[in-house]
Each structure stands twice: as structure tokens, then as C-alpha cells.
């Protein structure tokens, strides 16, 4: 995460833990996490994610669509990795 992303996240009232939990990437060397992040980035930038998370109460439909997509990305990445998830507890 770069400095601009950190500043945007803090301005939105989010912690890094909130952000990490939202998109289930733990930045280790595992294939699952990298696949999840790659898939999510096909549709959402980091800035998009922060905005959606910040406004989830004001725009619940947008948040629900994002969340459903992220869950689909996790399922697809898990399938690509033969069911392995890098030991990430939020990936299940």
C-alpha cells in the first residue's frame, strides 16, 4: 500500500486491518492471495475499494455488488490454487 492509499484510507476512517479484511489479501508470497488481488483489480482499483467501504452504509447496493464480486474472486482463486488459501483465515 502506498502513502496516498494510506492517507485516503485514514481519511475514510478505515484502518489497514479493515482494508486487508475487505479484500482478503495478506501480501505473503502465496499464490492464492496474489490471485485474489489480481482478480479484484480487474474491476476495482484500491481507491474504488476504499470509497466503497467508506460509503457502505450510504450505498448498500454498491457495497453488496462489490462484496459479492470479491467473494467470487476468492472462490475462483481457491479453485485455481487447488483449494489452498495461503493459510489466510479470512479467505474461507
Image: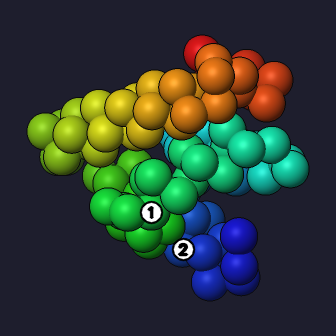
What label does residue 56 carry, if any? none
What label does residue 41 carry, if any? 1
Taking 59 as reference, is 7 left or right? Answer: right
- In which image quadrant can residue 44 be found? bottom left
- The quarter of the picture where the N terminus appears is bottom right
Write the residue at 86% across / 50% down.
Answer: 29
Does label 1 or label 2 sit earlier along the sequence?
2
Residue 25 vs 80, above or below: the answer is below
- Taking depth in this image into account, of 92 and 59 the one nearest to the observer is 92
- Taking depth in this image into account, of 89 and 19 the one nearest to the observer is 89
Say whether residue 18 is visible: no
Residue 4 vs 92, above or below: the answer is below
| Residue 38 in picture, x, y percent from top left | 53, 58
Q: Which residue is mark 2?
A: 8
Q: CA distance from mark 1 to mark 2?
A: 18 Å
Helix, strand or loop under label 2: helix
- In which image quadrant can residue 17 be found? top right
Q: Crowdedness of circle 1 by 10 Å Cα count: few (<14), some, many (20+)?
A: some
Write the residue at 71% across / 22% down.
Answer: 84
Write the residue at 52% across / 25% down.
Answer: 79
Query: How many labels sit on residues?
Result: 2
| Residue 68 in picture, x, y percent from top left | 29, 32
Rendering colour mode: rainbow
Outermost residue on the left side: it is 61
| Residue 86 in picture, x, y percent from top left | 79, 30
- Foreground mark, 1 or 2, reads 1
- The quarter of the picture where the C terminus appears is top right
Amino acid at each position: 500500500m502506498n502513502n496516498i492509499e494510506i492517507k485516503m484510507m485514514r481519511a475514510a476512517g478505515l484502518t489497514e486491518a479493515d482494508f486487508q479484511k475487505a479484500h482478503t489479501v495478506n501480501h505473503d508470497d502465496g499464490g492464492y492471495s496474489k490471485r485474489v488481488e489480481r482478480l479484484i483489480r480487474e474491476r476495482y482499483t484500491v481507491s474504488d475499494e476504499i470509497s466503497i467501504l467508506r460509503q457502505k452504509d450510504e450505498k448498500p447496493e454498491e457495497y453488496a455488488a462489490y462484496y459479492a464480486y470479491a467473494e467470487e474472486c476468492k472462490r475462483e482463486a481457491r479453485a485455481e490454487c487447488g483449494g489452498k488459501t495461503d493459510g489466510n483465515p479470512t479467505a474461507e
